Image (tube, rainbow, N blue to C red):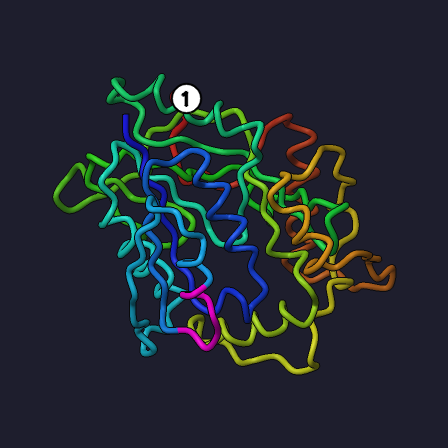
């Protein structure tokens, strides 16, 4: 079995991504990693190359600055990397996502288990979405609880979004992939980077969503519905712990006077309905068959 990892990056250092830690965690599972590195204003390309692992293959890319429709440029870059993967499986990990060292052998074993089962087209992971500082995770319908991150590399698939795939087994109509659970989480650290780096990230990405840049100089993490935050009880991956000490926010307090947005109110109602029904009502970009 051969497993390809892939991702795309641009201005990873400037925008405060733990992308080196992410790539090193992916190396625990993969036989090769394809990294599409966009033209950057920092040392992202040099940092990726400095890892010095022969399994990493870099593709230098130019982003389409005219593409401002719902972040589709991210999907374009994701596909550039995926279409260069040569493994039986293609494992997509974003630059702020980390694999725990305890889970790497479990992931590899799950891929071995399903390698010869054509019904399984993807592997789905649970998520820890850290928010504000490394001590808290966000848990609500507004934060996807599960997502496919591995796709079988011998089926016709493409990504209309950075978050999911569409399988094109028909000529004109696509569907979400049939998937099995990985039974382990992805650790998502994008919302604990320094407030200054988060502000820069939002402003730089606004262009690709046809949004206006914000003002203020730093991101205000305190503006959130505190009821969705839960204390993290587990252990962080070893590879990311130095980054958490040096680059992440260390403390966080939600604003008790925060006025709920319309979206937050909707998610509160949905959470109440989930509790009443005992069901997860979030949108799923996969069909779970195992």
Local secondary structure at mark 1: helix
In the rendered image, residue 110, in percent from the top left (x then y), is placed at 41, 21
Residue 136, above or below 65: above
Q: Which residue is drawn at 78% across and 62% down?
A: 222
Residue 217, above or below 97: below
Q: Give the image quarter of residue 218.
A: bottom right
Task: Tell me if I can see residue 116 in this picture.
Answer: yes
Q: State left or right for residue 154 relative to residue 264.
A: left
Q: Which residue is drawn at 55% across and 34% down?
A: 126
Q: State left or right for residue 194 relative to residue 53.
A: right
Q: State left or right for residue 276 relative to residue 82.
A: right
Would residue 212 be counted in the magenta stretch?
Answer: no
In the rendered image, residue 69, in percent from the top left (x then y), is placed at 37, 69
In the rendered image, residue 55, in percent from the top left (x then y), is placed at 33, 44
Q: Give the image quarter of residue 225.
A: bottom right
Q: In which quarter of the image is the C terminus?
A: top left
Q: How crowded is mark 1: few (under 14 residues within 10 Å), some or many (20 or more)?
A: some
Task: Tell me if I can see residue 281 in this picture.
Answer: no
**Residue lying farthest left?**
171
Residue 247, above or below 112: below
Seen from the viewer's position, the closer of residues 212 and 88 is 88
Seen from the viewer's position, the closer of residues 120 and 141 is 120
Kindly identify which residue carries mark 1.
Answer: 110
Please tell me how many numbered marks the rendered image carries: 1
- Give the residues drawn in magenta, as a range: 40-46
Q: Give the image quarter of residue 68.
A: bottom left
**Residue lying farthest right?**
256
Q: Which residue is drawn at 74% across and 58% down?
A: 224
In the rendered image, residue 78, in percent from the top left (x then y), is placed at 34, 55
Q: In which quarter of the image is the N terminus?
A: top left
Seen from the viewer's position, the closer of residues 86 and 131 is 86
């Amino acid at each position: 079995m051969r497993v390809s990892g892939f991702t795309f990056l641009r201005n990873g250092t400037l925008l405060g991504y733990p992308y080196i830690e992410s790539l090193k965690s992916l190396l625990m599972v993969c036989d090769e990693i394809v990294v599409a590195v966009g033209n950057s204003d920092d040392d992202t390309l040099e940092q990726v190359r400095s890892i010095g692992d022969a399994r990493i293959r870099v593709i230098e890319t130019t982003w389409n600055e005219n593409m401002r429709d719902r972040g589709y440029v991210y999907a374009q870059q994701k596909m550039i990397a995926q279409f260069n993967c040569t493994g039986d499986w293609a494992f997509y990990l974003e630059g702020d996502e980390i694999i725990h060292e305890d889970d790497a052998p479990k992931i590899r074993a799950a891929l071995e288990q399903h390698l010869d089962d054509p019904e399984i087209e993807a592997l789905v992971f649970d998520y820890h979405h850290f928010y504000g500082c490394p001590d808290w995770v966000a848990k609500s319908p507004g934060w996807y609880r599960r997502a496919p991150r591995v796709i079988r590399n011998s089926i016709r698939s493409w990504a209309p979004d950075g978050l999911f795939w569409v399988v094109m087994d028909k000529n004109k109509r696509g569907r979400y992939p049939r998937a099995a659970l990985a039974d382990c989480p992805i650790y998502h650290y994008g919302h604990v980077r320094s407030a200054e780096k988060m502000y820069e990230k939002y402003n730089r990405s606004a262009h690709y969503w046809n949004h206006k840049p914000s003002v203020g100089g730093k991101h205000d993490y305190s503006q959130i519905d505190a009821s969705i935050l839960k204390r993290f009880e587990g252990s962080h991956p070893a590879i990311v712990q130095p980054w958490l000490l040096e680059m992440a926010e260390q403390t966080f307090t939600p604003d008790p006077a925060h006025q709920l947005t319309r979206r937050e109110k909707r998610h509160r109602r949905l959470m109440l309905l989930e509790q009443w029904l005992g069901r997860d009502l979030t949108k799923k970009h996969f069909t779970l068959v195992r």
